[in-house]
Amino acid sequence: MDDMTTTYRTLRRIRYETRLRLLQVHAVERITPKMKRITLGGDELAGFVSASYDDHVKLFFPPAGQEKPVLPTLGPNGPAFPEGAARPVARDYTPRRYDAAANTLAIDFVLHGDGPATSWAAQAKPGQFLGVGGPRGSFVVPNGFDWYLLAGDETALPAIGRRLEELPPGTRALVVIEVADAGEQQRFDTRTRLDARWLHRGGAEPDALRLTKTVAELTLPPGDGYAWVATEATAAKALRRHLVEERGLRRDRVRASAYWRRGAVATHETYDD
């Protein structure tokens, strides 16, 4: 591999100055029965930057009975909330689409269970307020690889959809996504050469073996590829191990993240050992 190709495929990290924004809901759209897209806007959104499809912002939800969440101030010792103020519940989400011209930010919410994020998204209406912090940085994967593998469950769909929209025309992309049923499949606005495989759980629980088995059956294209995985912690670890140890991908060519962990809340971890 020559120096030019190596540079073209160099991964890089970008850091941003952390900003906190109080935004309002502009639009609410049902993408599938269990996925809602909520579009936010407001003057404070100006200057928003997100350079990578798997960036995450922290969303601050208003406490019950309150119109707006109380946002912390950022100081040398980290975020600080006003004394006596009720701290809002916060969760990490993917910036699905930022439109600088319209000054809007779309966030996709999976509607499952009765957690604070799901409960808020289920009733969200234009005019309501939401706090948004970050992103603090981006891990940028260049577009120069010969092929890309994207795998995960519905929590990974916002990042996968964004990536497929942003990849150049003709890029070879293999996608494996586990969802509840056929009604949760999405159509992607992409010009890639896409090979998408949807796995339906039916009434079953998410299963690490289901995703790993399907990925193991894939014939990976020749050339230098990059794999991205995001799902439950056990499945993310299993897929990374399979791709590195059994399929022979370089460790720095596989990025695996836990977007949730069974029995836990607010999980977001990346495995790169």
Image (cartoon, rainbow, N blue to C red):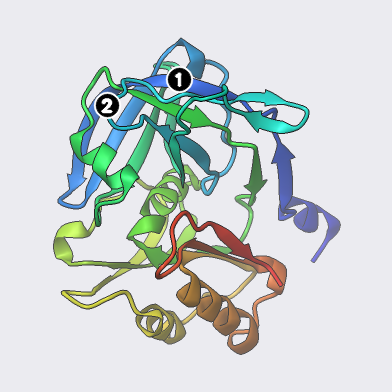
Secondary-structure class at tag 1: strand
Q: Nearer the viewer, mark 2 or mark 1?
A: 2
Residue at (71%, 40%) from the top-left corner? 14
Taking the image as shown, residue 215 lies to the left or right of residue 246, namely: left
Residue at (61%, 62%) from the top-left corner? 270
Under mark 2, the amino acid is Gly
Under mark 1, the amino acid is Leu
Mark 1 is surrounded, within 10 Å at the Cα level, by few (under 14), some (14 to 19) or many (20 or more) other residues, namely many
- Specify the farthest residue to the front: 84
Compared to 64, does 237 lie above or below?
below
Mark 2 is surrounded, within 10 Å at the Cα level, by few (under 14), some (14 to 19) or many (20 or more) other residues, namely few
Compared to 63, does 83 lie above or below?
above
Secondary-structure class at tag 2: loop
Distance from disc 2 to disc 1, alpha carbons, whole Å, reads 17 Å
Residue at (85%, 57%) from the top-left corner? 3
Location of mark 2 (residue): 65
- Quadrant in the rendering for residue 157: bottom left
Q: Is residue 164 visible?
A: yes
- The spot of residue 56 in percent (x, y) is 53, 43
- The spot of residue 257 in percent (x, y) is 54, 63
Of the residues under marks 2 and 1, which one precedes in the sequence? 1
Quadrant the C terminus occupies: bottom right
Residue at (32%, 74%) from the top-left corner? 206
Between 190 and 100, the one nearer to me in the picture = 100
- The spot of residue 160 in percent (x, y) is 42, 54
- The spot of residue 22 in percent (x, y) is 45, 20
Q: Is residue 175 visible?
A: no
Location of mark 1 (residue): 22
Between 225 and 180, the one nearer to me in the picture = 180
Compared to 201, does 149 lie above or below?
above
- Quadrant in the rendering for residue 55: top right
- Specify the farthest residue to the top: 43
